[in-house]
Image (cartoon, helix red, strand yellow):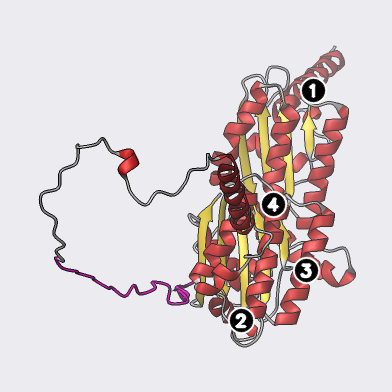
Amino acid sequence: MKKQKLIVLIFTMIMLFALAVPNFALDDKLVTGERVIDVAGFFSGDELNTLRENANKIADEYGLDLLFCIFDSDETEGDIYDEEFVYDYLVENKFMSESTDVEENLVVFFLDVSTYDYNWYTLGSGNVVFTEKDDDDIMEQVAEFFGKDQNFDAFYLIQDRVYTNCEIELSVQNSTSESDSSSSNVATGELSGFEAAKANKTIPNERYAPRLVDTADVLTDEQEAEILERLDEISERTNCDVVVALVNDLGLDTTGSPYSEITPFADDYFDYNGFGLGDTRDGILFTLSVERRKWAISTSGFGIDAFADDGQSYIMDRVVLDLKYDNYYEGVKVFVKYADKFITSARDGKILTGRELKKIGKTWTSPLWWAIPIGFIIAALIMIYHIITAKTVERQNLANEYTVPGSLNITRSTDRFLYRNVTRTVIESSDSGGSGSSTHTSSSGSSHGGSSGDF
């Protein structure tokens, strides 16, 4: 009898333990090891694979885990605002260690489809590549996608923002053995060369970025290759860096706050990426934020002299004609063409400002020039027509034929010269030949010229 009671007691304890386990363990549906977990059936198979491939690419290149967890709290246990639930989720899926000595780089996004509540968490370098500003910027659009059942587009937008910020804020990890050691720096949260230089406000002796960066992804691969080759050729031939940066978000400034204006971003991008050739760091940077629809020019060293204020205005008046219609490729080509013309002329001792600018582009192919001879031809034809069709009359020396006899009676006739008053004023030309370059000081303490605007 005692043996039976013991068996019943043991069985009861086992059942109680089995019932208690789900209260402490994470739901099995949320443990997959994948960077995108979709237990709510939000995505098609192809969409899910694409998002996972994108997440894996971010992890491989930047050492950052971007995780999506989409579930239905009516069917699966979990509270996206419960830090213990989030911690268990990360540990169970091997994206976070239980040891506090390991530095993880994470951006974790949770969505509960039963209420459409969302929450996100960041760790390590994730704090840099997805901030509250990013949340404010894109989550309204994400909600619109959800309202239209465009679920894939919503999460793709988040991935695109994080990837863009990674390109700006973090260094790319290469697969070669030489870069394996440096890529581990990103995995441990260490800043890239550009970010380290910006944090320390020190200008590096080496260049950290190519002369063309298109994190906004507005150019094709072929267009990027063509423009980069042209930028390198001009820079090396003129010994003056010509740089183009096409971005979406501007990232964070030297104080860790989002850039409020595009000009400080342009100066910092030039300085802390190590651009500028020679002792005076000669160069010009053209950057635009596709997201904000803002552009800026930053000049340094010889570039300040080569690109005076009116010269920059002349160039950008033509570039903006393409930018406002989203013709980024054509706009960049126009900038590069004029940058080459201005630097080459300046190296030859002739700064293109003032009257010189007015001579650029004035050719006989201009419609204005053709209008002059065409106008003369049309006027001549009209005159010939009137001469031919006019009624011929004989010349009359007197006006007798045109007056009524006896109607004109002149009693006195005199000629009297009164006076003459002629005033002559010399009109001075307001064009003195150039406006010069206004300058300012960047966060590094360097002197820059430049300008900015929108499109």
- Quadrant where the N terminus lies? top right
Residue 45 image point, x, y percent = 87, 28
Q: Which residue corresponds to mark 3? A: 230
Q: What's the distance in space between the residues labelled 4 and 1, CA to CA?
A: 38 Å
Residue 58 vs residue 297: left or right?
right
Q: Is residue 114 magenta?
A: no
Give the overall secondary structure of the magenta segment: loop
233 sits to left or right of 332: right
- In the picture, the disc for residue 328 is 4
The answer for how far apart the CA atoms under marks 2 and 4 are is 27 Å
Labelled pair 3, 1 in contact (Cβ < 8 Å)? no
Percent coordinates x, y for residue 225 in the rendering: 82, 61
Distance between mark 3 and mark 4 Cα atoms: 16 Å
Q: Which residue is mark 2?
A: 346
- Seen from the viewer's position, the closer of residues 396 and 263 is 396
Q: Which residue is mark 1?
A: 41
Q: Residue at x 62, y 88 (%)?
A: 279
Instruction: Using the numbered discs, state the Cα–Cα distance from disc 3 to disc 1 in whole angstroms.
Output: 48 Å
Q: Is residue 21 above or below residue 52?
A: above
Question: Which range is magenta?
Answer: 418-442
Query: Of the residues shown, which amino acid type is indicated by label 2?
Result: Ala
**Residue type, mark 1 in image:** Gly
Residues at marks 3 and 2, CA–CA distance in whole angstroms:
19 Å
